[in-house]
Amino acid sequence: IDQGLTGQDSGLSAGRDVERSGALEWSFSETAYAHLAIDRMNVRWSGENFNLILGRQAINLATTFFFSPNDFFAPFTAQTFYRVYKPGVDAVRAKYSTAELSYLSFISVLGYAPESDTDSGWSDNSESTRNSWLLRYVSNLAGFEWGLVTGKVRRNQVDGLSVSGEVFGLLGLRAEANHSESLDEPSVRNSSYSIGLEHRWESSFMIQFEQYYHSIGALDVASYDLQQTYPARRYQALGLSYELSPLWTGQASLIYNQVDYSRLYSINLLYSVSDESDLS
């Protein structure tokens, strides 16, 4: 299954490795990393029930937090601690509100061939075989938000679903899953899901847990495909967050590989410098 990109580890290198036209990116040095990229450039039309955005924009389809199998375009990786800013891709997005809490959206994203000698790592012009399109319907039922998605993502046919809401007023539930099939090799299939539970106390202390599975992941280290963002089949994540003061927030996370038992720990502090500025 074509993963399409490699995720950013910190989230601070937004734009690198994101599949989009290299025509809007430039490098200025052969000895150091000096790079300029246009990350947002689009036009928007808004009506009473209809919105249309054309151009470079962020496409976020995630429901879960750490692992997001349904977020196909420039997704954050589980170890990305800074998620305020998501890189843009070249896309058309149309959204029609069918009811107060329901909408139907159409998303088309241009795909590009990898080119190692360009500034961005991708070609300037789109490649039709790598173009993507998705239909997504979201509605509210029994206090939960449900989503259905179907379409083509690069060279794969994808069908998925998502759900989020609160259970018994105590636990937040987030889940998403999809099944994909290669258009080039129909025998190559992948099923993946992520399910998470979370709870936030009145003191602002929050705990999150997620379980991730994808069938193309390996069951032993010798079979790892290191081109994949997640080479193992099963992962778990645990996250903690607490507002130390109105300006300081402490965060910690543990990501656990259930195949080789490796672990990644992360501890960070986020300071609100102003309404539009953070120091991490």
Image (cartoon, rainbow, N blue to C red):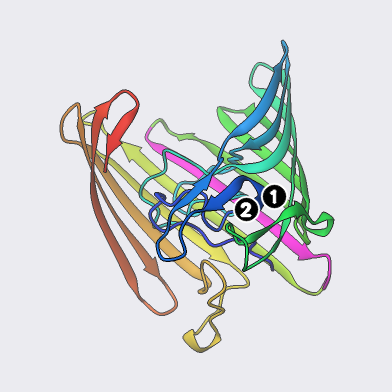
Estimate the x, y position of residue 146 in percent, counting from the top left.
Answer: 63, 36
Label 1, on which residue? 160
Estimate the x, y position of residue 256 in percent, counting from the top left.
Answer: 37, 67
In this rendering, position of residue 151 left or right of residue 224? right
- Which residue range is magenta in the image? 170-186
Which of the pair 185/171 is nearer the observer?
Answer: 185
Numbered mark located on residue 177 in the image: 2
Q: Main secondary structure of the magenta part?
A: strand
**Local SS, label 1:** strand
Quarter assignment of residue 56: top right
Q: Quadrant of the C terminus?
A: top left
Quarter assignment of residue 244: top left
**Local SS, label 2:** strand
In this rendering, position of residue 148 left or right of residue 257? right
Labels 2 and 1 touching (C-beta < 8 A): yes
Q: Quadrant of the N terminus?
A: bottom right
Q: At 49% across and 69% down in the image, what residue appears? A: 234
Which of the pair 214/106 is nearer the observer?
Answer: 106
First in sequence: mark 2 or mark 1?
A: 1
